[in-house]
Amino acid sequence: MKVGRLFPGIMVSNDVHDDPLDFVAGFSVLRVGDLTKEIVFGDLKSFFSCLLHRMGEESARAMAVVLNTFDGLDSTTLTGLMSKFRSCLAVGSLNLISPLLSEDSHACLIWLDRFAHNPASIAYVGFGMVMRFTPVEVAALAEGLESSGAPFIWSLKAREGFPAGFLEQTAGKGLIVPWALQSMVLGHVAMGVHVTHDGWNSMMESIAGTVPMICYPTLADYKLNNRLVSHAWRIGVEVDGGVLTRDEVVNSIELVLRKDEGRVMRERACKLRELGKESVGNGSSVEIFNKLLGILLVPGG
């Protein structure tokens, strides 16, 4: 039986994939199988596995661990982490403090303005800079987007793997760009759903825009994040069975954009955004950031 390391001093076997992480304070909504494999399964002597293990050891000795989150979003988890570290500081959401300032080089916002009369109607597909699609995944996404009938923006570097006729048949209703000003796109009134890999910054930007998510996590901490989105905060849905298919894309977009479940998700996301704005306005994040400054500027913290 393979054995992996979760935290220093805690050992987990790979026959507990669906077991909750309730032996770690504040993590009961998460499962062992949501952890990145380099922590629990696989080659535990790999570079990344050893790096994560060392980070766990060093974090426990750090004067402070700083997180891009806020108390109203992650209260239970933060309480658990505070019991593990000398000081756990939630100073986010950082995108609400300092929005990204950059040029909309592919005119996504101008394109979105065409749909401003129909709020929460557009699908945005953005999977960050690391994840790479297989041809099968590209085809499934393309077919699902076209069949859903929803207008969409798709941030995708390489235009490869599209089904025959896809670009022609979605012309005018779909915009495919190599890069999008994501925080601004998600903040547009027409934006209705974010098809995402569940990177933490992408999640924070979706919350800031009150945009529910369709989650397709594959790497790193993405499965953990997906579990928070779909089961803890309930502001999104996960791809069923972890397999991206045309029907799964169509059904998920239909649920979020056109059914009551999607409306309720947007309402929950709106409440979270308001908590975030309060935190960075004159609330807990401001107080905690000042505490961080004291640690950084005063010798010995």
Image (tube, helix red, strand yellow):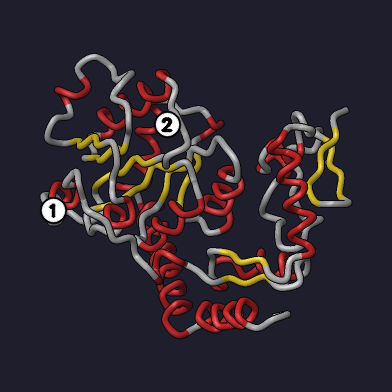
- Quarter holding the C terminus is bottom right
Residue at x-position 15% and y-position 56%: 116
Q: Report the residue marked by disc 2.
A: 248
Q: Position of residue 88 (x, y in %)?
A: 67, 70
Give how far apart the Cα atoms at labels 1 and 2 are.
28 Å
Does residue 18 appear anywhere in the picture?
A: no
Q: Amino acid at mark 1?
A: Asp
- Quarter holding the N terminus is top right
Q: How crowded is the residue under tag 2: few (<14 C-alpha within 10 Å), some, or many (20+)?
A: some
Q: Quadrant of residue 172?
A: top left
Point out the frontmost of discs 1 and 2: 1
Does residue 49 appear anywhere in the picture?
A: yes
Q: Position of residue 101 (x, y in %)?
A: 29, 61
- Secondary structure state at the residue bearing disc 1: helix
Q: Report the residue marked by disc 1.
A: 113
In the picture, the disc for residue 172 is: none
If you read the primary sequence from the N terminus, does the residue marked by circle 1 or circle 2 appear first? 1
| Residue 288 drawn above or below residue 175 | below
